[in-house]
Amino acid sequence: MKRSDRETQPVQGASRGQPDSAACNYVLAGQAIAAARPQPGLYVVATPIGNLGDITLRALEVLAGVDLIACEDTRVTRKLLDRYGITVPLTPYHDHNAAVARPKLLDRLKDGAAIALVSDAGTPLVSDPGYKLVEAAIQAGIPVTSVPGPSAVLTALVVSGLPSDRFFFEGFLPVKSAARRARLAALADIPGTLIFFESPRRLTDMLSDAAAVLGRREAAVARELTKLYENVRRDDLAALAQSYVDDGPPKGEIVVLIAPRPEGAAPAITATSIDALIADMLVKHSLKEAVAFVTAETGLPRREVYARALVVAKRMGSE
């Protein structure tokens, strides 16, 4: 029996015991469990960010029951499926092939397939191209269902000790220091905890730039969350930067969290933060317009801002 010919109505509960050769199964605690085929549509399924035991029962049911799983890296997803005895076909869907792969997935969905979308770790659509597939499916009238679960962003937030009532997820900052500082300056006034992904080799520079632009703020670096060597460091930005200078760059997946500016505290106006603000304005505005904006924003003398703007513009041109 083909997977597409199976009964499309979900069944109540799941049968335990010996696998049914006509059904798709997953294995949990040594027991083979028959998974019902989901209704046709796209299923956005969250997967573990490290510890494979964090998969949800609903995610296993959906992953075992769909016709196809679209994933960033088939090798990564295959490790998860092998852990739970799932043999559903995989197809790659990532930044480099999305333009070609997306129409093919949409054709399958229009033909009545049930397809799961997963990322390498955590909740799809966070720093990956999945949102374009979801957008296209919605426009085509295809049902889209979320199967919630792990998220590195929320996992890091709840162990950071920083305010969690409001937060802003930025993803990765620019690689070059000038652009990174400009972006940090643009985020400085957001009234919530700032959350970033960062690579180990850029972490120290990123923390140093954040300290220079944002001033003294509490922060946390969460590393290898849910894994064997999970670690969270908490201190102010400058101290955290120095700790990684002393100890060397860390290894693994990293989330950086920065507290909002304390209520009532004045913005940190330093030469570095002024340069960052000027650089941010110069990306889309003329030198004259950038100087006028920064002068009004900081209250500094126009002559001083203009002199800094000339230096920043020259530096940006050389990078």
Image (spheres, grey):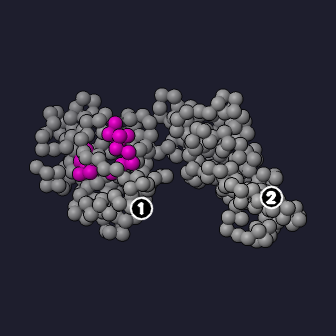
Whether residue 244 can be seen here: yes
Residue 20 locus on image (x, y percent) = 13, 39
Circle 2: residue type: Val
Cβ atoms at labels 1 and 2 below 8 Å apart: no
Q: In the image, which is nearer the foreground, mark 1 or mark 2? A: 2
- Residue segment shown in magenta: 64-79
207 is within the stretch colored magenta: no
The reply, left or right, for residue 214 in relation to residue 232 is right
Residue 68: in magenta span: yes
| In this picture, residue 197 sits left or right of residue 238 | left
- Asked whether residue 191 appears in the rendered view, the answer is no
Q: Position of residue 6 (x, y in %)?
A: 14, 52
Q: In which quarter of the image is the C terminus?
A: bottom right
Which numbered dot is residue 132? 1
Residue ID at (68%, 58%): 186
Q: Which three-letter amino acid code belongs to the residue tagged 1?
A: Lys
Query: Which residue corresponds to mark 2?
Result: 311
Q: Give how far across and how far down residue 193 sits, in percent.
A: 63, 49
